Image (cartoon, coloured by chain):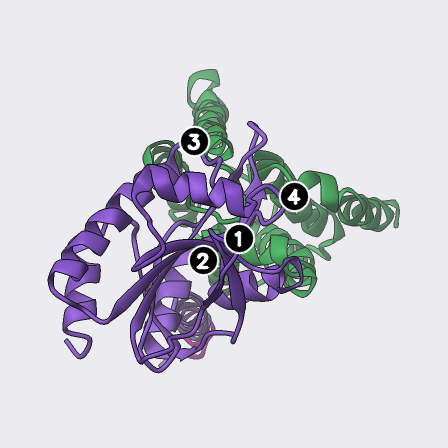
Chain colours: A green, B purple
Amino acid sequence: MTERLWGGVIILACITLRPFAETDPVVHILVQLPVLAIAGYVLSPRKVVRPATAIALTVVAVTATAFWMLPRSIDLAVANGWADAVKFVTVPVCIGMALSMAWPNLPDLVRPFLKAQVLSMLGVLGFVYLHAPIRICNAYLQSDQERLGFGFLFVAGFLALLWIYPVFSGGAFRAPARNDVRLPI
Amino acid sequence: MKAVTVLPVLAALMGGGLLFQATDGFRAVTTEGARRIDVAENPTLVPDIVLEGMDGKTVSLRPIRHETVLVEFIYTSCPVVCQEAAVDFARIRDSLTEARANVRLISVSFDPVQDTPGAMSEYGAYHGADGTVWTVARPDRGDLDRLLNRFGITVIPDEWFGYQHNAAIHLVDGAGRLAAIYDTDAVKQVIDKVLQPDD
């Protein structure tokens, strides 16, 4: 019950802080979106699902992530309150909640595959945002775009360290418990 | 097909369909790209707005004698982008004048408060816009939002008391429809389109 309460508090805080968060693309994309996804994780019923359902949920999460990765979706969220409302629902539900149920039930090969995808995609985004000769988002300044590019690279580096650490600490060699529900990072 | 594989395949198909829709068929990931596709596929009339020109004369946004109107949005105190765009705009004017094309060029200020007729004249004189083929003009303050919305221009203040905006050359055809949008340095493409509108 307290977890549900916290999930609600996080989402309410995101809604309240929306005008501040969305003036800066680094906060909007690298803080608000992940926090909304975490709220979905906290609110998730975290039911055990079959592998096929887990794959389907992962596809939903990947689709939602790809959608909110489109610069035009972000522009729309800044310009239009309804689009932003859609974001406040779909990021927690389709990314945080879906992934929290899918992750522990995914085939073993899929998890590292997804992690590798996340790292390479963040790297590509970082490169694009640092080197694009045009403004990618109408809602944000060129200088913001470059800061966001560095932000993507920083997050990619951080996640790479986080995910490679178990290999050196020996943690990677323990068989993960089935249905062991943890934050998927 | 096994029942267990239906769900993931269904999710993938729906996800792919959604992303296809959201990107105009994987053609536009940015708002600016989407705007250009939309304009090229669905040309619609520009608002019937009368602008104030450099010398205080009225300037029609819509064509008067079925001429093509090239529009770019600027603010005269712009340090870099608009000035570079103005150099290319001058080249377009020169080529089209030489080709005797039925065309007008307007640099429209989206900062009508700062850009007085005097400031616009100064900007025009600097870039060689003399008001015959190419003029600098500003909308009435009450028309500004409608104008920017219709053209899909987003203007945001930058950190140097200026603005950043999606810079482009907008082609209004002889019938008064916004029909194409080009990069400000796409000089040849704009000239070709004006001279051969049906290509």
Labels 2, 3: front one: 3
Residue contact at pointers 1 and 4, CB within 8 angstroms:
no
- In the foreground, B101 or A77: B101
Is label 2 in contact with label 1 (beta carbons under 8 Å)? Answer: yes
Front tag of 3 and 1: 3
Residue B145: horizontal and vertical position, in percent?
61, 61
* Dots 3 and 1 on the same chain: yes
Task: Give, as a single range, the part of the protein colored magenta.
Answer: B3-8
Farthest residue, direction left: B99
Question: Whole-Å distance between the Cαs marked 4 and 2?
Answer: 17 Å
Picture quarter containing residue B106? Answer: bottom left
> Regarding mark 1 in the picture, which secondary structure is present there?
loop
Q: CA distance from mark 2 to mark 1?
A: 10 Å
Query: Depth check: A182 or A13 in front?
Result: A13
Q: x, y percentage for residue B26? A: 33, 65
Residue denoted by label 3: B79
Q: Residue at x 82, y 50 (%)?
A: A8
Residue drawn at x 47%, y 50% as measured from the top left: A69
Residue at the disc numbered 1: B154
Front disc: 1 or 4:
1
Q: Secondary structure at mark 4?
A: loop
Q: Secondary structure at mark 2?
A: helix
To the question of a shared chain for discs 4 and 2, the answer is: no
Overall secondary structure of the magenta section: helix
- Which disc, if any, is residue A22? 4
Chain of the residue under the numbered disc 2 shown in the image: B
Are both tags, 2 and 1, on one chain? yes
Where residue A178 appears, x then y in whole percent? Answer: 56, 47
